[in-house]
Image (cartoon, helix red, strand yellow):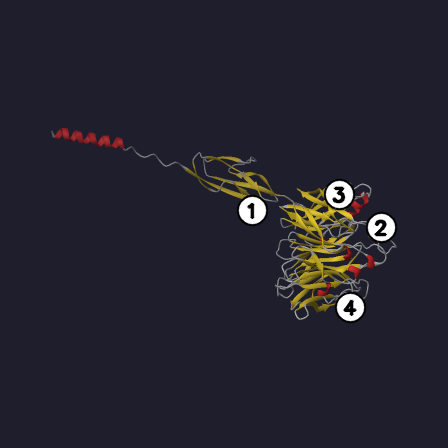
């Protein structure tokens, strides 16, 4: 019996051992180390880590901007992308990239034909020759440029104003890297625009024809436009008996009612400032009596809150070019609202800086905080028939100013500009000055080569309101001519748009887009 029990125990033990076989060994694992050369040149679809033996997958290498993929090295040498990998051992794989040399200036050209159904070819080409009032705007991520129509200025000649008619405007649209014709703007025609101002989806333009020898008869209109769907819906601000020479134009709220008001100068009869106050129904009334005007011939104007009281001041600057600098007809003037008289009265004035050897008249003025101290400053562009320059005036509080920076003076053979733009051109958080050259061909001789050089159009702010023209790279191009250049910003990058034509009778316009790579 005992013998049988022993045999049974042995049998049961054997059966249990067969029911619980030895576990299978763990699968083998291999490590994968992935590198990018140079660091930051691209990204990979897989990451370094541990993989099971014989696991298979693909690795895609994607180059970042300014780089190209240049193959794999290490455990696998290949140019395939994506790369097929089988983990049968530990592997170290490096994705190699080459830097792509980007030119400092990328130039894109396109020739477009402007329809002539409503205009003479010579009028259209004139529009693109000296478009001082040209401006760019964005709608739904599309960029447009408005070229206000421009008839000939026949100043100084015995010509009747009625002999020269206004010219309709053109709108170009950017498609990819080039500019194409978008449409004719037939709502508002112009003689010659210089200044404009954009605020939100509103734009204000003042016109002035400079026709004939009697400048008191120079005339134009003021328009406010609503920007929408790539076009502009225009509304004439002035009445038919209120036409004048509206060189300087600005918009803001000077009476605190939340509606945009408009200031223009030198205005009707060429001798002062006109104030157009907006009514709740969208119409405008001229109320020049709100300002106790002092001065010579202001050519430029702005509205801005200079003292932080949430009420705009009126800022003007005289033209009067050609006189010696110490005469009092080149002044910047600040008008502040006086509650007791219910008028804007002269609050502060200062002459042009004595750095000039010849009196320079102000052509454009803009208010911004250039030195990042929380107080608005004033930038002024100046010109004479001999030279031009610009300066920055530091706000010191109480709507008063002192000279902070002045540019060198340029001869008219070097740079011709009346206007300038203000935005952060090099993405460093500071507002820069972008000069806007116009009026004629821009080719010049630089270092024995005839070319267009953009460095002296771009003035970089060091953050303290001190400016130097951009000189880290040469920004130049050859064999492409332009009559004008408008700076604008696209995705934070600085661009210029320009135009050129060769024949008055053939309205084929060369459009040029220039991207600046700092």
Query: Nearer the viewer's eye, disc 1 or disc 4?
Result: 4
**In this picture, is 441 found above or below 25?**
below
Q: Residue furthest left?
A: 1
Q: Say the numbered circle drawn on residue 276.
A: none
Most foreground residue, 461 or 394: 394
Q: What residue is shown with label 4?
A: 328
Query: Nearer the viewer's eye, disc 1 or disc 3?
Result: 3
Residue 139 in sight: yes
Residue 216 in percent (x, y) is at 82, 59
Which tag, 1 or 4, sits closer to the chain's start? 1
Does the residue at mark 1 contact the one at mark 3 (Cβ under 8 Å)?
no
Does the residue at mark 2 contact the one at mark 4 (Cβ under 8 Å)?
no
Q: What residue is shown with label 3?
A: 510
Which tag, 1 or 2, sits closer to the chain's start? 1
3D distance between C-alphas at marks 1 and 4: 59 Å
**Quarter that holds the N terminus:** top left
Give SS at disc 2. helix
Which tag, 2 or 3, sits closer to the chain's start? 2
Query: Nearer the viewer's eye, disc 3 or disc 4?
Result: 4
Q: Residue furthest front?
A: 281
Query: Nearer the viewer's eye, disc 2 or disc 3?
Result: 2
3D distance between C-alphas at marks 2 and 4: 37 Å
Give SS at disc 3. strand
Q: Say the numbered circle drawn on residue 163.
A: 2
Does the residue at mark 2 contact the one at mark 3 (Cβ under 8 Å)?
no
Q: What residue is shown with label 1?
A: 40
User: What residue appears at the point 25 percent right and 32 percent down from the top-left corner?
Assistant: 17
3D distance between C-alphas at marks 2 and 3: 30 Å
Residue 497 in percent (x, y) is at 71, 47
User: What residue appears at the point 21 percent right and 32 percent down from the top-left corner?
Assistant: 13
Which tag, 2 or 4, sits closer to the chain's start? 2
């Amino acid at each position: 019996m005992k013998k049988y029990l022993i045999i049974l125990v042995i049998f049961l033990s054997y059966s249990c051992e067969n029911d619980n076989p030895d576990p299978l060994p763990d699968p083998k694992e291999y490590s994968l180390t992935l590198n990018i050369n140079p660091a930051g040149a691209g990204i990979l679809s897989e990451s370094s880590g541990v993989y099971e033996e014989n696991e298979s997958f693909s690795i895609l290498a994607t180059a970042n901007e300014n780089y190209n993929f240049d193959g794999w090295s290490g455990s696998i040498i290949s140019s395939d992308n994506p790369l097929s990998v089988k983990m049968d051992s530990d592997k170290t794989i490096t994705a190699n990239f080459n830097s792509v040399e980007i030119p400092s200036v990328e130039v894109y050209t396109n020739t477009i034909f402007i329809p002539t159904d409503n205009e003479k070819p010579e009028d259209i080409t004139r529009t693109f020759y000296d478009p001082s009032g040209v401006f760019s705007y964005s709608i739904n991520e599309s960029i447009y440029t408005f070229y206000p129509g421009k008839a000939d200025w026949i100043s100084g000649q015995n010509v009747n104003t009625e002999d020269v008619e206004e010219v309709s405007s053109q709108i170009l649209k950017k498609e990819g890297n080039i500019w194409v014709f978008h449409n004719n703007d037939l709502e508002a025609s112009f003689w010659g625009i210089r200044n404009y101002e954009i605020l939100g989806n509103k734009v204000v333009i003042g016109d002035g024809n400079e026709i004939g020898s009697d400048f008191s008869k120079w005339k134009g209109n003021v328009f406010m436009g609503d920007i929408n769907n790539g076009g502009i819906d225009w509304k004439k601000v002035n009445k038919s008996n209120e036409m004048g020479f509206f060189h300087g134009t600005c918009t803001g709220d000077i009476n605190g009612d939340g509606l945009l008001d408009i200031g223009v100068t030198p205005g009707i009869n060429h001798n002062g400032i006109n104030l157009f106050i907006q009514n709740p129904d969208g119409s405008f009334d001229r109320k020049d009596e709100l300002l106790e005007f002092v001065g010579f011939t202001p050519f430029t104007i702005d509205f801005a809150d200079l003292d932080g009281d949430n009420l705009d001041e009126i800022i003007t600057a005289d033209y009067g070019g050609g006189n010696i600098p110490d005469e009092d007809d080149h002044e910047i003037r600040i008008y502040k609202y006086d509650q007791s008289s219910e008028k804007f009265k002269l609050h502060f004035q200062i002459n042009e800086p004595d750095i000039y050897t010849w009196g320079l008249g102000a052509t454009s003025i803009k208010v911004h905080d250039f030195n990042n101290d929380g107080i608005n400053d004033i930038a002024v562009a100046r010109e004479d028939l001999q030279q031009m320059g610009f300066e920055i005036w530091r706000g010191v509080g109480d709507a008063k100013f002192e000279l902070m920076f002045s540019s060198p003076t340029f001869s008219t053979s070097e740079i011709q500009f009346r206007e300038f733009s203000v935005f952060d051109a090099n993405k460093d958080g500071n507002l820069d000055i972008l000069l806007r050259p116009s009026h004629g061909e821009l080719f010049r001789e630089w270092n024995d080569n005839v070319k267009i050089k953009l460095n002296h159009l771009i003035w970089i702010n060091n953050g303290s309101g001190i400016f130097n023209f951009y000189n880290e790279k040469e920004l130049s191009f050859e064999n492409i001519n332009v009559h004008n250049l408008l700076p604008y910003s696209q995705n934070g990058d600085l661009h210029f748009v320009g135009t050129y034509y060769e024949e008055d009778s053939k309205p084929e316009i060369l459009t040029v887009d220039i991207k600046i790579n700092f």
